[in-house]
Amino acid sequence: MLVRLYIKDYAIVDELEVHFEKSFQVLTGETGAGKSILVGALALLCGDRGHADLVRSGGTKAILEAEFKTEQNDDLTNLLKHVNAEILNETLILRREISQNGLSRAFINDSPVNVNDLGKISSFLIDLHGQHQHQRLIHPETHIYYLDAFGKLTPLLEKYGQAFDQYNKDRKELESLIDLRKSSYEKHDLYAYQIDELEKATLHEDELDQLEQERKILENSEDLFETTDAVSSILYLSDNSVQKNIQEVISRLRQISNIDGKFLELISSLESSQLAIEEIGQFCEQYGSSLEFNPERLEEIRVRESELNWLLKKYQVTTISELIKHKEEMISELALIENYDERIEELTKRLQSEQLQLRELAIEISNKRKKSGQNFKTKLEKLLDSVGLANTRFNVQIDWQEDPDGDVVIDNRHYRLTNQGLDTVEFYIGLNVGEPVRPLHKIASGGEISRIMLCIKSLIADSDDIETLVFDEIDVGISGRFAQIVANRMREISKNHQLIVITHLPQIAAQGQAHYSVSKVEQNGRTKVQVKKLNFDDRITDIAKLLSGERITANTLATAKELLSLQNDA
């Protein structure tokens, strides 16, 4: 059950905390007082999308927090384990923060989770029926969701949904491969030619740099020979070479070092220099003697460079490594083209297997829907009788969608599969004795729709064991004696569920075992929302306002007191 709702810097709420009880609780207040803000906060904690405009002016972030008392549940426990959270002392605290830039964070018992997981977990704790949601009943395409919720088909539908998504993914890939195969023949010949051309070129990543270096040497071999010959002569070979002159200097210094030892360090430095000069001279001598002017090799290099540069230009790349990568990519593409038939055959067989699996799952889901549809009909008709729709006949119409291009063949007929299976579901209703049942959306009035939705929500909540139900003005369109009937039905629901109801009807407000008044006040030049739990006398006044507006008379006070006394008699 929901025990506490905390709101800070959300919409026009600066800070608000409401404590709830395990009972039938009502919230009343004038239109625009802020009741929808409380529902909006709960909706965000149930995974609704948030945005920056929800942050109160002047606030840095909106903070929403709901504390639930709950018992261990295998499905809930497994889901919590998946997000690294757990129930602590039978308590789960759901928290949502929305910053000024629109970024949102969610937590469960202080463990961070994504908003999608927050919504999944909250679905085990609370069923939120927002304002005007009951109008969804007038759209037949939504009926299937109510039936599936009643029949607890979610696990089977998730399994089917995964298979359905994989089937569509594989089918799109097959269609793409078939289209590619049609245009592959021309590419096949082109790729084969280009691969052959690049293979014959025997490409090496550093070859162009090596060729350039070798060409420079060959083109300048005469200058290189003259220079290295001169250097080796100066340093090493001539009679007056640097090496011989240094040797003479060393000999003279050694003679005087006997007189002053300071020259020994100089001699050591000169001997090191002498070795370096000798090595340089020998290198230049050997380099010059190894040089060979080879016009044929030079021409080969120029031709090879020209060939490689032409390939770079042709394939619009700048390096040999890119050219090699392009060749490898074409080899892979060519292999794929050559294996289209094999891949197409493989996918075709897989799709046949997936189609068979989908067929079996869809039939299983349909059978379960038909079975739960009968149970749904029986139970709902009893509930409808309790809200003033006596002798109502209710039918669940389940049909398969026949389609000549459908994916599934059953008894030589083709049927279309959707993400919900084979079925279309529509609710039919007969409200008057002697009249046939007809599509619900064509004959039910606003007040009747509200009562039907109340009964459906009650059935689904009982089926899913959801403890907390929140109804935001589900009583729209209900008046007169039916208001008291609906109030009594809500009182019955609250025996097995925590029921929180936002209402404008005095009959429903009077049935609440706890009553909260929502209002707007001004403080320090700012509007804020406040929620006050009413005592018995305050409830009389509040219900009197619902009966007659701001002008309260002795008669309306007496009527309000009488309505409250009905609760005590219940």
Image (cartoon, grey):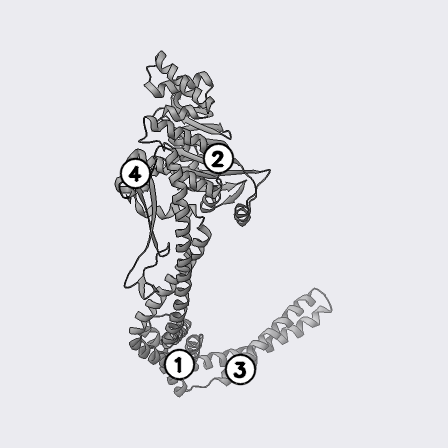
- Looking at the rendered structure, the kind of residue marked 2 is His
Check disc 1 and report the residue beneath it: 199
Give the CA separation, mark 4 to mark 3: 116 Å
Q: Are marks 4 and 2 in contact (CB under 8 Å)?
A: no
Secondary structure type for disc 3 = helix
Q: Looking at the rendered structure, which numbered label has been put on residue 431?
A: 4
Q: Position of residue 221 (x, y in %)?
A: 43, 82
Q: Which residue is disc 2 drawn over?
A: 497
- Between label 2 and label 1, give the one nearer the viewer: 2
Residue 253 occupies quadrant: bottom right
* Distance from the alpha carbon under mark 3 to that under mark 2: 103 Å
**Spatial separation of the CA atoms under disc 4 and disc 2:** 29 Å
Give the number of the disc on residue 285.
3
Q: Are marks 2 and 1 in contact (CB under 8 Å)?
A: no
Compare marks 2 and 1 and give the one earlier in the sequence.
Answer: 1
Closest to the observer, 415 or 8: 415
- Report the Cα–Cα distance between label 3 and label 1: 42 Å
Q: Is residue 138 above or below residue 19?
A: below
Mark whose residue sits in front, 4 or 3:
4
Identified by mark 1, the residue type is: Glu
Q: Position of residue 206 (x, y in %)?
A: 45, 75
Q: Quadrant of residue 91?
A: top right
User: Which of the numbered marks, if any, corresponds to residue 239?
Assistant: none
Q: Which residue is most to the front?
A: 434
Q: Does residue 371 show up?
A: yes
Q: Is residue 22 left or right of residue 255?
A: left
